[in-house]
Image (cartoon, helix red, strand yellow):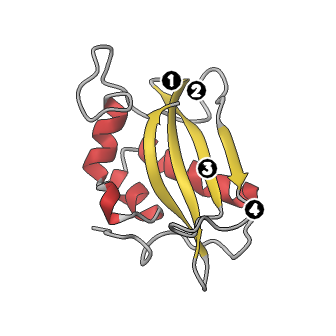
Amino acid sequence: MCFFGFETARRLPLATSDHDVLVVVEDWIDLIAEDRFEDAFCLSAHHPEQGWTPQLMQEVIAGYGLPDPHPDGPFSVTSRHQATGTPFHKDVTRIGEPVEKDGHVAVVQYDLPLNGKWSDLTAGFLLLPRPEAEYLVLQDIHVF
């Protein structure tokens, strides 16, 4: 089990490109589409106060942004390559100076393909630099 996640999280080079950041998020989505929540959890880093676990990620996705059952659910992430439509949010927003509170330098938003089509359920990450590398930190999974 990964906890804070810097030990197992994918290391990105310092000043990594937006493209490379999105590739990591796409790998995260692909793992979840294969029901590999533990592996996806370990791919990103986590702030302990966020409370994310692989099980909570699965529950929030199934509940369309909430950890409770959704009346139209359950929802599950499906293949990005087979989903119909297009994601509205698939972006990296750079911040000029690192945010003082936690030092993140970018916000990443990527819509999730649910039950075969792109949805407005969005995974949000922060890009957090450390002296040796940059890491994606799972922030939220919510309806944008």
Q: CA distance from mark 4 to mark 2?
A: 34 Å
**Pointer 3 with pointer 2, Cβ within 8 A:** no
Q: Disc 2 marks which amino acid?
A: Ala
Q: Disc 3 marks which amino acid?
A: Val
Q: Disc 4 marks which amino acid?
A: Gly
The quadrant of the image that shows the N terminus is bottom left
User: Is 117 drawn above or below residue 41 in the view shown?
Assistant: above
Residue 123 versus residue 107: which sits nearer the camera? 107
Q: Earlier in the sequence, mark 2 or mark 1?
A: 2
Disc 2 is placed on an element classified as loop
Q: Quadrant of residue 41?
A: bottom left
Q: Position of residue 120 (x, y in %)?
A: 53, 26
Left or right side of 5 for 130: right
Which mark is on residue 116?
A: 1
Q: Quadrant of residue 14?
A: bottom right
User: Is 23 drawn above or below residue 132 in the view shown?
Assistant: above
Which mark is on residue 96?
A: 4
Disc 4 or disc 3, which is closer to the eye?
4
**Pointer 2 with pointer 1, Cβ within 8 A:** yes
Q: Position of residue 39 (x, y in %)?
A: 39, 59
Kindly identify the residue that appears in the image at 40 percent across and 70 percent down: 5
Q: Earlier in the sequence, mark 4 or mark 2?
A: 2
Crowd class of label 2 (few under 14; some 14 to 19; many from 20; radius 10 Å): some
Disc 3 or disc 2, which is closer to the eye?
3
Kindly identify the residue that appears in the image at 49 percent across and 61 percent down: 137
Which mark is on residue 108?
A: 3
Kindly identify the residue that appears in the image at 75 percent across and 62 percent down: 96
Residue labelled with disc 2: 83
User: In the orientation shown, which residue stands out farthest toward the front?
Assistant: 100
Q: CA distance from mark 4 to mark 3?
A: 15 Å
Q: Earlier in the sequence, mark 3 or mark 1?
A: 3
Disc 1 is placed on an element classified as loop
